[in-house]
Each structure stands twice: as C-alpha cells, then as structure tokens.
Image: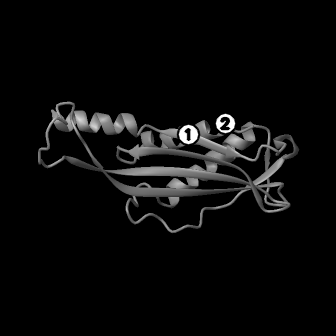
Amino acid sequence: MNRIITLLMIFAVGCASVKVRKDGAVDFGKYQTFYCMECLDEYSHIAPEYDNPETRELIRESIIAELEAKGLKYTEEDPQMLVDFKVIIEERTAIMTTPETTYYYWETYDAPTVSFKRGTLLINLIDASNNQAIWQGAASRIIDEDPSDKYNEKIKSKVARIFNKYN
C-alpha cells in the first residue's frame, strides 16, 4: 500500500510541466520562415528506448507541424528562424515520507526511496540573422510507460503544449 501511495505522489509531483522563456522585445510576426535542425547530441545511455533516432525524428516532425500550423513556412534556403531541440533524460531518486511520520521525537528508520526517469524536451528558437536565442520552451515529465504508439502521441502532445505558449 505504501508503495502505491509513494508512486502516486511521484506521479502527481512529476506530471508534465511546460515552461517558456522569451525575449520580450521580439516581434514574432516578422518571422515567416524557419528551419528545424536535427538534434546532434549523443543519445541517452540511461534510456535508449526513449531517446533514439525514431523518437528524435518524431519530435522534429512535430515541431515542424506545429510551426507550419502557426503559418510559418519550412525551408532550408535562408530561413529567418532556426529551431534547435534537446532531449534530456535523467535518472532520479526520491526519498519518500508518509503522513504517519512524527516529528515529536528523533527516530531512526530507513526512509523508502523510489527511482525513476525524468525526461525533458527543450526547444530553442533562434533568430538566423544574428544567431540570438529569442524563445525557449520546455516540457518535463516522469517517464512511466513503455515506449509505444501511446508514448508517441504523448510526445506530439507535449510539443503542441509547448507551442501553445508561442507568441
């Protein structure tokens, strides 16, 4: 029972979060074209089942689809904006306490720990004319399922959530 409560607590805390940082002085209306670069970072040794060529291509295709849906045109010839992304997978451990833990006296006990993987997708938009970052979006979540078609849909959903904050 405690293990179930612990996992539920981690899931609640680790649900996907989306954050965006942008240069407030940027007029996004001036960008009509973009090019999405391939992620050339090494693949994760922690979780190759989640970070592999197929997953990165799905991310790239999702980014292109989202920006095209916003009216931008994909081009390799002299784009106004460059898009770069990173996939970060970390092995984490959490120490859990239960509501029954008392703080009235010092008691030695083995605190239960749970290991999990946390994945982060980081997307950067760069002004191609001066090579300056103008926007950054990120989504993080605990990776709690086997890679599958459902996992692929989650990737597409996370990319869409990141670009919902594009303006």
- Residue appearing at x 50%, y 50% in the figure: 120
Horizontal and vertical percent for residue 56? 54, 56
Side of 92 where 162 appears, left or right: right
Q: Residue at x 23, y 39 (%)?
A: 97
x, y percent for residue 125: 72, 52
Does 101 sit above or below residue 92? above
The residue pinned by badge 1 equals 18
Q: Which residue is mark 2?
A: 165
Q: Amino acid at mark 2?
A: Lys
Q: Are marks 2 and 1 in contact (CB under 8 Å)?
A: yes
Q: Residue furthest right?
A: 30
What residue occupies the far left of the structure in this picture? 108
- The image quarter in which residue 107 lies: top left
Q: Residue at x 65, y 34 (%)?
A: 164
| Kind of residue indicated by mark 1 | Val
Q: CA distance from mark 2 to mark 1?
A: 9 Å
**Mark 1 element type:** strand
* Image coords of residue 152 (percent x, y): 48, 44
Answer left or right for 148 relative to 129. Answer: left
x and y, in percent, of residue 28 in the image: 81, 42
Give the mark, 2 or 1, whose residue is nearer the N terminus: 1
Q: Relative to 41, say whether 94 is above or below.
A: above
